[in-house]
Image: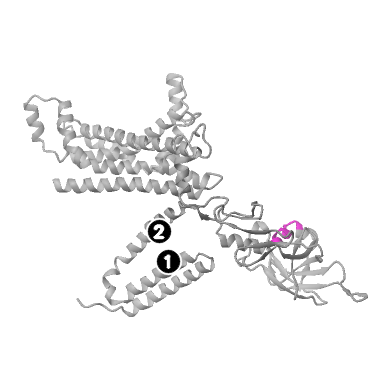
Protein backbone atom coordinates (compact mmCIF):
# COMPACT_ATOMS: atom_id res chain seq x y z
CA UNK A 1 0.00 0.00 0.00
CA UNK A 2 1.37 3.40 -0.99
CA UNK A 3 2.10 5.85 1.78
CA UNK A 4 -0.72 8.34 2.21
CA UNK A 5 0.02 12.03 2.15
CA UNK A 6 -1.63 14.28 4.75
CA UNK A 7 -4.76 16.08 3.62
CA UNK A 8 -5.12 19.89 3.85
CA UNK A 9 -7.30 19.46 6.95
CA UNK A 10 -4.61 17.34 8.61
CA UNK A 11 -2.03 20.01 7.77
CA UNK A 12 -4.15 22.74 9.33
CA UNK A 13 -4.98 20.77 12.50
CA UNK A 14 -1.41 19.58 12.98
CA UNK A 15 -0.11 23.12 12.54
CA UNK A 16 -2.57 24.51 15.08
CA UNK A 17 -1.66 21.84 17.64
CA UNK A 18 2.06 22.40 17.02
CA UNK A 19 1.73 26.18 17.42
CA UNK A 20 -0.19 25.75 20.68
CA UNK A 21 2.40 23.25 21.94
CA UNK A 22 5.26 25.60 21.04
CA UNK A 23 3.56 28.42 22.95
CA UNK A 24 3.27 26.15 26.00
CA UNK A 25 6.94 25.17 25.59
CA UNK A 26 7.90 28.84 25.52
CA UNK A 27 5.95 29.61 28.70
CA UNK A 28 7.42 26.59 30.49
CA UNK A 29 10.91 27.69 29.44
CA UNK A 30 10.21 31.20 30.73
CA UNK A 31 9.24 29.76 34.11
CA UNK A 32 12.71 28.22 34.41
CA UNK A 33 11.76 24.56 33.77
CA UNK A 34 14.31 24.01 31.01
CA UNK A 35 14.32 20.19 31.12
CA UNK A 36 10.53 19.95 30.88
CA UNK A 37 10.49 22.51 28.06
CA UNK A 38 13.09 20.56 26.06
CA UNK A 39 11.22 17.30 26.61
CA UNK A 40 7.96 18.82 25.42
CA UNK A 41 9.74 20.38 22.44
CA UNK A 42 11.02 16.94 21.42
CA UNK A 43 7.52 15.46 21.77
CA UNK A 44 6.12 18.29 19.63
CA UNK A 45 8.70 17.59 16.93
CA UNK A 46 7.87 13.88 17.04
CA UNK A 47 4.16 14.70 16.81
CA UNK A 48 4.71 16.81 13.68
CA UNK A 49 6.88 14.09 12.11
CA UNK A 50 4.37 11.31 12.77
CA UNK A 51 1.33 13.18 11.48
CA UNK A 52 2.89 14.94 8.49
CA UNK A 53 5.40 12.39 7.21
CA UNK A 54 3.84 9.78 4.94
CA UNK A 55 6.42 7.17 5.99
CA UNK A 56 5.19 7.34 9.60
CA UNK A 57 1.54 6.79 8.67
CA UNK A 58 1.21 3.50 10.56
CA UNK A 59 2.34 5.12 13.83
CA UNK A 60 -0.42 7.74 13.86
CA UNK A 61 -2.78 5.42 15.71
CA UNK A 62 -0.17 4.35 18.25
CA UNK A 63 1.25 7.80 18.96
CA UNK A 64 -1.51 9.10 21.32
CA UNK A 65 -1.35 5.95 23.44
CA UNK A 66 2.44 5.90 23.51
CA UNK A 67 2.51 9.60 24.35
CA UNK A 68 0.07 9.11 27.23
CA UNK A 69 2.07 6.10 28.45
CA UNK A 70 5.25 8.15 28.38
CA UNK A 71 3.76 11.18 30.14
CA UNK A 72 1.73 9.40 32.80
CA UNK A 73 3.83 6.26 33.42
CA UNK A 74 7.42 6.51 32.20
CA UNK A 75 8.05 10.15 33.16
CA UNK A 76 6.71 9.80 36.77
CA UNK A 77 8.79 6.63 37.21
CA UNK A 78 12.00 8.29 36.05
CA UNK A 79 11.26 11.48 38.00
CA UNK A 80 10.54 9.54 41.21
CA UNK A 81 13.71 7.47 40.78
CA UNK A 82 15.86 10.59 40.27
CA UNK A 83 14.35 12.51 43.21
CA UNK A 84 15.19 9.54 45.45
CA UNK A 85 18.88 10.45 45.05
CA UNK A 86 18.45 14.13 45.99
CA UNK A 87 18.10 16.17 49.16
CA UNK A 88 14.63 17.51 48.43
CA UNK A 89 12.55 18.49 51.46
CA UNK A 90 10.91 21.45 53.18
CA UNK A 91 14.26 23.11 53.92
CA UNK A 92 15.63 22.37 50.43
CA UNK A 93 12.72 23.14 48.11
CA UNK A 94 14.25 25.59 45.65
CA UNK A 95 16.90 25.05 43.02
CA UNK A 96 20.38 26.54 43.43
CA UNK A 97 19.71 29.19 40.77
CA UNK A 98 16.46 30.25 42.47
CA UNK A 99 18.17 30.61 45.86
CA UNK A 100 21.01 32.63 44.35
CA UNK A 101 18.52 34.85 42.52
CA UNK A 102 16.67 35.40 45.81
CA UNK A 103 19.90 36.60 47.45
CA UNK A 104 20.53 39.03 44.60
CA UNK A 105 17.00 40.45 44.93
CA UNK A 106 17.35 41.23 48.63
CA UNK A 107 17.78 44.89 49.57
CA UNK A 108 18.69 46.89 52.67
CA UNK A 109 18.31 50.47 53.88
CA UNK A 110 21.68 52.27 54.00
CA UNK A 111 22.59 54.74 56.73
CA UNK A 112 22.43 57.70 54.32
CA UNK A 113 19.08 56.63 52.87
CA UNK A 114 16.71 59.33 51.64
CA UNK A 115 13.24 59.09 53.18
CA UNK A 116 10.14 60.08 51.26
CA UNK A 117 6.59 60.79 52.30
CA UNK A 118 4.09 59.27 49.92
CA UNK A 119 0.53 59.59 48.71
CA UNK A 120 -1.59 57.33 46.56
CA UNK A 121 -3.80 58.94 43.94
CA UNK A 122 -6.76 56.91 42.71
CA UNK A 123 -7.11 57.01 38.92
CA UNK A 124 -10.29 56.93 36.86
CA UNK A 125 -8.96 54.17 34.60
CA UNK A 126 -9.93 51.45 37.10
CA UNK A 127 -11.18 50.76 40.64
CA UNK A 128 -7.73 49.59 41.74
CA UNK A 129 -5.53 51.81 39.58
CA UNK A 130 -3.28 54.27 41.42
CA UNK A 131 -0.36 56.60 40.97
CA UNK A 132 2.32 57.01 43.63
CA UNK A 133 3.60 60.45 44.63
CA UNK A 134 6.87 60.71 46.59
CA UNK A 135 8.39 63.78 48.23
CA UNK A 136 11.68 63.74 50.13
CA UNK A 137 11.41 64.77 53.78
CA UNK A 138 14.44 67.13 53.50
CA UNK A 139 15.68 69.16 50.59
CA UNK A 140 18.97 68.29 48.91
CA UNK A 141 22.05 70.43 49.63
CA UNK A 142 23.41 72.36 46.62
CA UNK A 143 26.40 74.52 47.56
CA UNK A 144 25.40 76.89 50.32
CA UNK A 145 21.72 76.65 49.52
CA UNK A 146 19.21 73.93 50.22
CA UNK A 147 17.34 72.84 47.10
CA UNK A 148 13.62 72.13 47.29
CA UNK A 149 12.46 68.60 48.20
CA UNK A 150 12.64 65.92 45.53
CA UNK A 151 9.23 65.09 44.04
CA UNK A 152 8.52 61.97 41.96
CA UNK A 153 5.45 60.58 40.23
CA UNK A 154 4.75 57.08 38.92
CA UNK A 155 2.78 55.80 35.98
CA UNK A 156 -0.64 54.26 36.79
CA UNK A 157 -0.37 50.75 38.26
CA UNK A 158 -2.77 48.20 39.72
CA UNK A 159 -2.72 47.77 43.50
CA UNK A 160 -5.04 45.21 45.08
CA UNK A 161 -5.75 44.73 48.81
CA UNK A 162 -4.10 41.52 50.12
CA UNK A 163 -7.45 39.73 50.45
CA UNK A 164 -8.06 40.17 46.69
CA UNK A 165 -4.72 38.65 45.70
CA UNK A 166 -2.18 40.13 43.31
CA UNK A 167 -2.65 41.68 39.85
CA UNK A 168 -2.42 39.40 36.81
CA UNK A 169 1.09 40.61 35.95
CA UNK A 170 2.40 40.06 39.47
CA UNK A 171 5.92 39.49 38.16
CA UNK A 172 6.10 43.07 36.85
CA UNK A 173 6.14 44.96 40.14
CA UNK A 174 9.00 47.39 39.46
CA UNK A 175 8.10 50.79 38.04
CA UNK A 176 10.06 53.80 36.81
CA UNK A 177 9.46 57.17 38.48
CA UNK A 178 9.47 60.57 36.77
CA UNK A 179 9.66 64.09 38.11
CA UNK A 180 6.28 65.05 39.49
CA UNK A 181 4.32 67.84 37.77
CA UNK A 182 2.87 70.71 39.75
CA UNK A 183 -0.70 69.53 39.17
CA UNK A 184 -1.27 65.90 40.20
CA UNK A 185 -4.14 63.97 38.65
CA UNK A 186 -6.51 61.74 40.58
CA UNK A 187 -7.99 61.68 44.07
CA UNK A 188 -5.47 61.51 46.93
CA UNK A 189 -6.19 58.79 49.51
CA UNK A 190 -6.21 59.66 53.17
CA UNK A 191 -4.22 57.50 55.58
CA UNK A 192 -7.28 55.49 56.81
CA UNK A 193 -8.11 54.70 53.18
CA UNK A 194 -4.65 53.11 52.89
CA UNK A 195 -4.53 51.32 56.25
CA UNK A 196 -8.07 49.90 56.37
CA UNK A 197 -7.81 47.83 53.15
CA UNK A 198 -4.13 47.20 54.02
CA UNK A 199 -2.82 48.73 50.81
CA UNK A 200 0.46 49.47 52.58
CA UNK A 201 0.98 45.71 52.90
CA UNK A 202 0.39 45.22 49.18
CA UNK A 203 2.92 47.99 48.47
CA UNK A 204 5.68 45.86 50.03
CA UNK A 205 5.76 43.78 46.85
CA UNK A 206 6.45 46.85 44.70
CA UNK A 207 9.72 48.62 43.93
CA UNK A 208 10.13 52.01 42.29
CA UNK A 209 13.17 53.26 40.42
CA UNK A 210 14.35 56.83 41.01
CA UNK A 211 15.51 58.45 37.72
CA UNK A 212 19.27 57.81 37.48
CA UNK A 213 19.20 56.68 41.10
CA UNK A 214 18.56 53.76 43.44
CA UNK A 215 15.39 51.85 44.15
CA UNK A 216 12.91 53.00 46.77
CA UNK A 217 10.44 50.81 48.63
CA UNK A 218 7.91 51.26 51.40
CA UNK A 219 9.51 51.49 54.84
CA UNK A 220 6.96 51.08 57.62
CA UNK A 221 3.54 52.67 57.30
CA UNK A 222 4.15 56.31 56.42
CA UNK A 223 7.25 56.53 54.25
CA UNK A 224 9.35 55.16 51.41
CA UNK A 225 13.14 55.02 51.64
CA UNK A 226 16.20 54.25 49.54
CA UNK A 227 16.96 50.54 49.12
CA UNK A 228 20.29 49.15 47.91
CA UNK A 229 21.13 45.57 46.83
CA UNK A 230 22.17 43.59 49.91
CA UNK A 231 24.34 41.07 48.07
CA UNK A 232 26.94 41.63 45.37
CA UNK A 233 27.87 38.90 42.92
CA UNK A 234 31.66 38.45 43.07
CA UNK A 235 31.66 36.14 40.10
CA UNK A 236 31.22 32.41 40.01
CA UNK A 237 29.12 31.42 43.00
CA UNK A 238 30.49 33.79 45.67
CA UNK A 239 28.33 36.59 47.09
CA UNK A 240 29.35 39.52 49.31
CA UNK A 241 27.06 41.14 51.89
CA UNK A 242 27.16 44.92 51.31
CA UNK A 243 26.07 45.65 54.88
CA UNK A 244 28.54 43.63 56.96
CA UNK A 245 31.09 42.44 54.37
CA UNK A 246 30.45 38.71 54.78
CA UNK A 247 31.25 36.47 51.83
CA UNK A 248 29.19 33.35 51.28
CA UNK A 249 29.42 30.50 48.80
CA UNK A 250 27.35 27.36 48.20
CA UNK A 251 28.11 24.08 49.93
CA UNK A 252 26.79 21.45 47.51
CA UNK A 253 26.89 18.71 50.15
CA UNK A 254 24.87 20.64 52.74
CA UNK A 255 22.62 22.30 50.20
CA UNK A 256 23.12 25.76 51.75
CA UNK A 257 25.13 28.92 51.23
CA UNK A 258 27.70 29.14 54.05
CA UNK A 259 30.01 31.89 55.30
CA UNK A 260 33.69 31.59 56.22
CA UNK A 261 32.79 30.20 59.66
CA UNK A 262 30.57 27.48 58.23
CA UNK A 263 27.27 29.08 59.28
CA UNK A 264 24.38 28.49 56.90
CA UNK A 265 22.73 31.57 55.37
CA UNK A 266 19.30 31.83 53.77
CA UNK A 267 17.25 29.07 52.22
CA UNK A 268 18.53 25.61 51.39
CA UNK A 269 18.60 24.38 47.79
CA UNK A 270 18.10 20.98 46.21
CA UNK A 271 21.28 18.99 45.77
CA UNK A 272 22.40 15.46 44.96
CA UNK A 273 22.69 13.26 48.04
CA UNK A 274 23.65 9.96 46.43
CA UNK A 275 22.29 6.95 48.29
CA UNK A 276 21.72 8.94 51.51
CA UNK A 277 17.93 8.42 51.46
CA UNK A 278 18.35 4.66 50.99
CA UNK A 279 20.94 4.60 53.77
CA UNK A 280 18.41 6.28 56.07
CA UNK A 281 15.95 3.47 55.42
CA UNK A 282 18.43 0.82 56.59
CA UNK A 283 20.66 2.82 58.94
CA UNK A 284 18.70 5.63 60.62
CA UNK A 285 16.73 4.23 63.57
CA UNK A 286 14.16 7.03 63.27
CA UNK A 287 13.34 5.83 59.76
CA UNK A 288 14.36 2.17 59.89
CA UNK A 289 12.21 1.26 62.90
CA UNK A 290 8.87 2.51 61.50
CA UNK A 291 9.78 1.36 57.98
CA UNK A 292 10.43 -2.26 59.02
CA UNK A 293 7.26 -2.42 61.14
CA UNK A 294 5.18 -0.88 58.36
CA UNK A 295 6.72 -3.21 55.76
CA UNK A 296 5.90 -6.28 57.87
CA UNK A 297 2.34 -5.06 58.43
CA UNK A 298 1.97 -4.34 54.69
CA UNK A 299 2.92 -7.92 53.83
CA UNK A 300 0.63 -9.33 56.55
CA UNK A 301 -2.24 -7.07 55.51
CA UNK A 302 -1.89 -8.00 51.83
CA UNK A 303 -1.52 -11.71 52.55
CA UNK A 304 -4.45 -11.90 54.99
CA UNK A 305 -6.63 -9.82 52.68
CA UNK A 306 -6.03 -12.22 49.79
CA UNK A 307 -6.39 -15.33 51.97
CA UNK A 308 -9.57 -14.26 53.77
CA UNK A 309 -11.33 -12.73 50.77
CA UNK A 310 -10.50 -15.80 48.69
CA UNK A 311 -11.66 -18.18 51.43
CA UNK A 312 -14.98 -16.36 51.91
CA UNK A 313 -15.54 -15.86 48.19
CA UNK A 314 -14.70 -19.50 47.49
CA UNK A 315 -17.07 -20.83 50.16
CA UNK A 316 -19.90 -18.62 48.91
CA UNK A 317 -19.23 -19.64 45.30
CA UNK A 318 -19.37 -23.33 46.23
CA UNK A 319 -22.59 -22.85 48.20
CA UNK A 320 -24.22 -20.96 45.34
CA UNK A 321 -23.32 -23.80 42.96
CA UNK A 322 -25.37 -26.19 45.10
CA UNK A 323 -28.26 -27.13 42.82
CA UNK A 324 -30.68 -27.89 45.66
CA UNK A 325 -30.37 -24.34 47.03
CA UNK A 326 -33.45 -22.29 46.19
CA UNK A 327 -33.14 -18.65 45.15
CA UNK A 328 -29.52 -18.95 44.09
CA UNK A 329 -29.79 -16.09 41.62
CA UNK A 330 -31.22 -13.76 44.26
CA UNK A 331 -28.50 -14.70 46.74
CA UNK A 332 -25.79 -14.22 44.12
CA UNK A 333 -27.18 -10.79 43.20
CA UNK A 334 -27.28 -9.66 46.83
CA UNK A 335 -23.79 -10.94 47.56
CA UNK A 336 -22.34 -9.07 44.57
CA UNK A 337 -23.80 -5.73 45.71
CA UNK A 338 -20.68 -4.67 47.70
CA UNK A 339 -18.75 -4.91 44.42
CA UNK A 340 -21.25 -2.61 42.69
CA UNK A 341 -20.98 0.18 45.27
CA UNK A 342 -17.97 2.51 44.79
CA UNK A 343 -15.27 1.49 47.25
CA UNK A 344 -14.70 4.97 48.65
CA UNK A 345 -18.40 5.24 49.58
CA UNK A 346 -18.36 1.88 51.36
CA UNK A 347 -15.18 2.83 53.23
CA UNK A 348 -16.67 6.10 54.48
CA UNK A 349 -19.88 4.31 55.54
CA UNK A 350 -17.83 1.78 57.51
CA UNK A 351 -15.82 4.61 59.04
CA UNK A 352 -19.03 6.00 60.48
CA UNK A 353 -20.26 2.57 61.59
CA UNK A 354 -16.99 1.88 63.45
CA UNK A 355 -17.08 5.25 65.23
CA UNK A 356 -16.18 4.57 68.87
CA UNK A 357 -18.71 6.98 70.36
CA UNK A 358 -21.77 6.92 68.12
CA UNK A 359 -21.13 4.20 65.51
CA UNK A 360 -23.81 1.60 64.80
CA UNK A 361 -21.45 -1.32 65.52
CA UNK A 362 -20.45 -0.06 68.97
CA UNK A 363 -24.06 0.83 69.78
CA UNK A 364 -25.09 -2.76 69.04
CA UNK A 365 -22.16 -4.27 70.96
CA UNK A 366 -22.90 -2.00 73.91
CA UNK A 367 -26.57 -3.02 74.01
CA UNK A 368 -25.87 -6.72 73.50
CA UNK A 369 -22.65 -7.25 75.47
CA UNK A 370 -21.98 -4.00 77.33
CA UNK A 371 -18.73 -3.30 75.46
CA UNK A 372 -17.42 -0.51 73.24
CA UNK A 373 -14.25 -1.60 71.40
CA UNK A 374 -11.68 1.13 70.71
CA UNK A 375 -11.53 0.59 66.97
CA UNK A 376 -9.48 3.67 66.16
CA UNK A 377 -7.14 3.93 69.16
CA UNK A 378 -6.20 0.30 69.84
CA UNK A 379 -3.58 -0.89 67.29
CA UNK A 380 -4.84 -4.50 67.18
CA UNK A 381 -8.49 -3.51 66.83
CA UNK A 382 -7.63 -0.87 64.23
CA UNK A 383 -5.85 -3.48 62.11
CA UNK A 384 -8.78 -5.86 62.59
CA UNK A 385 -11.17 -3.15 61.43
CA UNK A 386 -9.08 -2.56 58.31
CA UNK A 387 -9.13 -6.27 57.48
CA UNK A 388 -12.89 -6.55 58.09
CA UNK A 389 -13.64 -3.68 55.74
CA UNK A 390 -11.24 -5.00 53.10
CA UNK A 391 -12.83 -8.45 53.26
CA UNK A 392 -16.22 -6.85 52.67
CA UNK A 393 -14.85 -4.98 49.66
CA UNK A 394 -12.90 -7.90 48.20
CA UNK A 395 -14.95 -11.07 48.64
CA UNK A 396 -17.41 -10.39 45.73
CA UNK A 397 -14.51 -10.33 43.25
CA UNK A 398 -13.16 -13.62 44.59
CA UNK A 399 -16.66 -15.11 44.51
CA UNK A 400 -17.10 -14.13 40.87
CA UNK A 401 -13.80 -15.56 39.63
CA UNK A 402 -14.25 -18.72 41.72
CA UNK A 403 -17.76 -19.17 40.29
CA UNK A 404 -16.42 -18.92 36.76
CA UNK A 405 -13.77 -21.57 37.39
CA UNK A 406 -16.18 -23.86 39.28
CA UNK A 407 -18.61 -23.86 36.38
CA UNK A 408 -15.84 -25.07 34.08
CA UNK A 409 -15.22 -28.23 36.16
CA UNK A 410 -16.94 -31.30 34.63
CA UNK A 411 -19.72 -32.71 36.81
CA UNK A 412 -18.67 -36.26 35.96
CA UNK A 413 -15.70 -36.19 38.34
CA UNK A 414 -18.02 -35.50 41.29
CA UNK A 415 -20.36 -38.29 40.17
CA UNK A 416 -17.42 -40.70 40.01
CA UNK A 417 -16.26 -39.54 43.43
CA UNK A 418 -19.73 -40.12 44.87
CA UNK A 419 -19.70 -43.69 43.55
CA UNK A 420 -16.41 -44.21 45.43
CA UNK A 421 -18.11 -43.04 48.63
CA UNK A 422 -16.47 -39.63 48.90
CA UNK A 423 -18.03 -36.88 51.05
CA UNK A 424 -18.38 -33.13 50.51
CA UNK A 425 -15.21 -32.13 52.38
CA UNK A 426 -13.16 -34.71 50.51
CA UNK A 427 -14.48 -33.43 47.18
CA UNK A 428 -13.68 -29.83 48.11
CA UNK A 429 -10.10 -30.36 49.29
CA UNK A 430 -9.10 -33.22 46.98
CA UNK A 431 -10.93 -32.31 43.77
CA UNK A 432 -12.21 -28.74 43.71
CA UNK A 433 -9.23 -26.86 45.17
CA UNK A 434 -6.55 -28.65 43.09
CA UNK A 435 -8.55 -27.93 39.94
CA UNK A 436 -9.30 -24.25 40.53
CA UNK A 437 -6.09 -23.03 42.19
CA UNK A 438 -3.72 -23.16 39.15
CA UNK A 439 -5.80 -20.79 36.99
CA UNK A 440 -6.54 -18.54 39.99
CA UNK A 441 -2.96 -18.13 41.24
CA UNK A 442 -2.14 -15.24 38.83
CA UNK A 443 -5.31 -13.46 39.96
CA UNK A 444 -4.42 -14.01 43.61
CA UNK A 445 -0.95 -12.56 43.03
CA UNK A 446 -2.54 -9.57 41.28
CA UNK A 447 -4.86 -9.13 44.26
CA UNK A 448 -1.85 -9.25 46.60
CA UNK A 449 -0.12 -6.53 44.56
CA UNK A 450 -3.29 -4.41 44.61
CA UNK A 451 -3.63 -4.66 48.39
CA UNK A 452 0.08 -3.96 48.77
CA UNK A 453 -0.74 -0.48 47.40
CA UNK A 454 -4.30 -0.13 48.73
CA UNK A 455 -3.99 3.58 49.48
CA UNK A 456 -7.71 4.46 49.46
CA UNK A 457 -8.68 1.99 52.18
CA UNK A 458 -6.08 3.12 54.70
CA UNK A 459 -6.27 6.82 53.93
CA UNK A 460 -10.08 7.05 54.05
CA UNK A 461 -10.66 4.64 56.94
CA UNK A 462 -7.91 5.32 59.50
CA UNK A 463 -5.46 7.83 57.95
CA UNK A 464 -2.83 5.35 59.14
CA UNK A 465 -3.76 5.77 62.81
CA UNK A 466 -3.37 5.23 65.64
CA UNK A 467 0.08 6.83 65.75
CA UNK A 468 2.96 4.43 66.24
CA UNK A 469 4.39 4.55 69.77
CA UNK A 470 8.12 5.31 70.21
CA UNK A 471 8.47 6.68 66.70
CA UNK A 472 8.98 10.18 65.41
CA UNK A 473 7.25 11.60 62.38
CA UNK A 474 4.04 10.45 60.76
CA UNK A 475 4.15 6.64 61.04
CA UNK A 476 0.90 4.95 62.09
CA UNK A 477 0.02 1.44 63.20
CA UNK A 478 -2.25 0.80 60.19
CA UNK A 479 -0.05 2.58 57.66
CA UNK A 480 1.09 0.54 54.70
CA UNK A 481 4.12 1.54 52.65
CA UNK A 482 2.21 3.64 50.15
CA UNK A 483 0.40 5.71 52.81
CA UNK A 484 3.63 6.06 54.80
CA UNK A 485 5.29 7.39 51.66
CA UNK A 486 2.44 9.85 51.11
CA UNK A 487 2.65 11.03 54.72
CA UNK A 488 6.40 11.60 54.48
CA UNK A 489 5.99 13.66 51.33
CA UNK A 490 2.88 15.72 52.06
CA UNK A 491 1.83 15.50 55.73
CA UNK A 492 5.17 15.54 57.54
CA UNK A 493 6.37 19.00 58.56
CA UNK A 494 9.64 18.26 56.78
CA UNK A 495 7.99 17.36 53.45
CA UNK A 496 10.77 14.85 52.81
CA UNK A 497 10.18 14.24 49.11
CA UNK A 498 13.57 12.61 48.58
CA UNK A 499 13.04 9.94 51.24
CA UNK A 500 9.45 9.40 50.08
CA UNK A 501 10.64 8.86 46.50
CA UNK A 502 13.27 6.38 47.70
CA UNK A 503 10.57 4.34 49.45
CA UNK A 504 8.31 4.67 46.39
CA UNK A 505 11.13 3.28 44.24
CA UNK A 506 11.44 0.26 46.53
CA UNK A 507 7.67 -0.17 46.31
CA UNK A 508 7.86 -0.08 42.52
CA UNK A 509 10.43 -2.87 42.40
CA UNK A 510 8.40 -5.01 44.82
CA UNK A 511 5.19 -4.61 42.84
CA UNK A 512 7.10 -4.96 39.57
CA UNK A 513 8.51 -8.28 40.77
CA UNK A 514 5.02 -9.48 41.67
CA UNK A 515 3.78 -8.42 38.23
CA UNK A 516 6.63 -10.33 36.57
CA UNK A 517 5.84 -13.49 38.56
CA UNK A 518 2.17 -13.06 37.68
CA UNK A 519 3.01 -12.79 33.97
CA UNK A 520 5.18 -15.91 34.06
CA UNK A 521 2.50 -17.93 35.85
CA UNK A 522 -0.11 -16.77 33.35
CA UNK A 523 2.11 -17.85 30.46
CA UNK A 524 2.73 -21.22 32.11
CA UNK A 525 -0.99 -21.81 32.58
CA UNK A 526 -1.60 -20.90 28.95
CA UNK A 527 0.99 -23.48 27.84
CA UNK A 528 -0.52 -26.16 30.11
CA UNK A 529 -3.98 -25.56 28.67
Quarter containing the N terminus? bottom left
Name the residue: 16% across, 39% down: 407
Position of 411 with respect to 291 (left or right) is: left
Answer whether residue 460 is visible to the viewer in this image.
yes
Look at the picture and state if 432 lies above or below 33: above
Residue 498 lies, in percent from the top left, at 48, 50
Marks 1 and 2, Cα distance to the nearest angstrom?
A: 10 Å
Q: Callout 2 environment at 10 Å: few (<14), some (14 to 19), or many (20+)?
A: few
Name the residue: 50% across, 64% down: 33
The label on residue 39 is: 1
Position of 235 with respect to 518 (left or right) is: right
Is residue 199 in the magenta section?
yes
Residue that lies at the very extreme toward the front in this rendered image: 260
Whether residues under marks 1 and 2 lie with C-beta atoms below 8 angstroms apart, the answer is yes
Position of 34 with respect to 65 (left or right) is: right
The label on residue 57 is: none
Principal secondary structure, stretch drawn in magenta = helix
Residue 453 lies, in percent from the top left, at 38, 44
Helix, strand or loop at disc 2? helix
To which residue does mark 2 refer? 75
Dividing the picture into quadrants, the one containing residue 132 is bottom right
- Residue in the foreground of this view, choosing between 277 and 398: 277
Residue 145 lies, in percent from the top left, at 92, 75
Dividing the picture into quadrants, the one containing residue 405 is top left
Provide the residue span drawn in magenta: 195-204
Is residue 394 in the magenta section?
no
Name the residue: 46% across, 34% down: 477
Look at the picture and state if 320 lies above or below 421: below
- Disc on the earlier residue, 1 or 2: 1
Amino acid sequence: MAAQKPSPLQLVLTTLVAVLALYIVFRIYQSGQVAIALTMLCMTGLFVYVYLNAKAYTYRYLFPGLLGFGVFVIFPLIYTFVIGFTRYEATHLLSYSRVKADFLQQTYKPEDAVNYTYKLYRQESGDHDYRLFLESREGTQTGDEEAPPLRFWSEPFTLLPPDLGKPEKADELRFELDSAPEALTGQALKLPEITKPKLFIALRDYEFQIPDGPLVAIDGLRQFSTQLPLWKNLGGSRLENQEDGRIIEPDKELGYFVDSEGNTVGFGFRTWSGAENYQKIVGDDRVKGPFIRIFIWTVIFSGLSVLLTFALGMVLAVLLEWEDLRGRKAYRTLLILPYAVPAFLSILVFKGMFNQEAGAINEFLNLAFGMKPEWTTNPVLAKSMVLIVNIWLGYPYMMLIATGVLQSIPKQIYEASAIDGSNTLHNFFKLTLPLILPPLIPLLIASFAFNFNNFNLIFLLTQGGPKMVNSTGVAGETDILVTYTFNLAFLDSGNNYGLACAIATILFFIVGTLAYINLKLTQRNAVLR
